Amino acid sequence: MTSGETDDATASYVTDVAEYWESGGFSHAAGQILGHLMVCEPAEQTQAELAETLGLSAGTVSTQLKILLAVEMVERVRRRGVRTSFYQVPKNMWTRVLASETSRIGGLRGLADKGLKVLPQTRPDRIVSLDQMVRFFEHEWPQLEERLEEFLRKEES
């Protein structure tokens, strides 16, 4: 594969990541940043490098990095003697993202419980289906996390 083909494949990948995360509620720019940080060399990039490479404004990069930092999909890296911050995808980010589902399930449990107390007469399925889904994931999620940890241990050995 030539350098041009590699660059085209990389750009296509970054676009695919951006479109995937955009469909889930992130901005396209946040998805571009995440996608780029997943495949760039070196793995750590400055805000200026991200802006230049992705054709985004400095303000957009700054705003989207704050969002990605808040959800722990990106981390700030400091280098001794260098004032500029670098950004990268944290190690094990994907398992940490999945692990955050436990707290999300807990939050949905609270909403389901409160909803059951004010269950509407018309179409109670709006609350009942939430409760059913939460009960399913409360039962299945811990087992799935254990299986993932076991799988990853085997992959590392």
Image: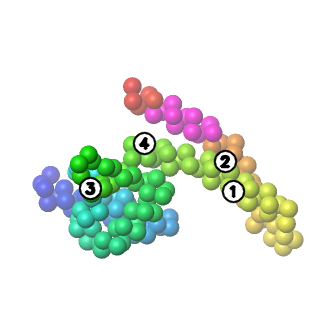
Picture coordinates of residue 16 (x, y %)?
Answer: 36, 62
* Residue 67 in picture, x, y percent from top left: 45, 63
Residue annotated with mark 3 = 83
Location of residue 74 with respect to 157 vertically, above or below: below
The residue sitting at 34% across, 58% down in the picture is: 35
Q: Disc 1 or 4, which lies upstream in sequence?
A: 4
Type of amino acid under label 2: Phe
Give the camera-side residue of 156 and 133. 156
| Disc 4/disc 3 C-alpha distance (Å) | 26 Å
Residue at the spot of label 2: 137
Alpha carbon of mark 3 to alpha carbon of mark 2: how far?
45 Å
Q: Which residue is mark 1?
A: 108
Residue positioned 45% across, 47% down in the render: 94
Going from N to C along the chain, the mark reached first, 1 or 2, is 1
Q: Is residue 34 above or below residue 63?
A: above
Question: Mark 1 belongs to which amino acid?
Answer: Leu
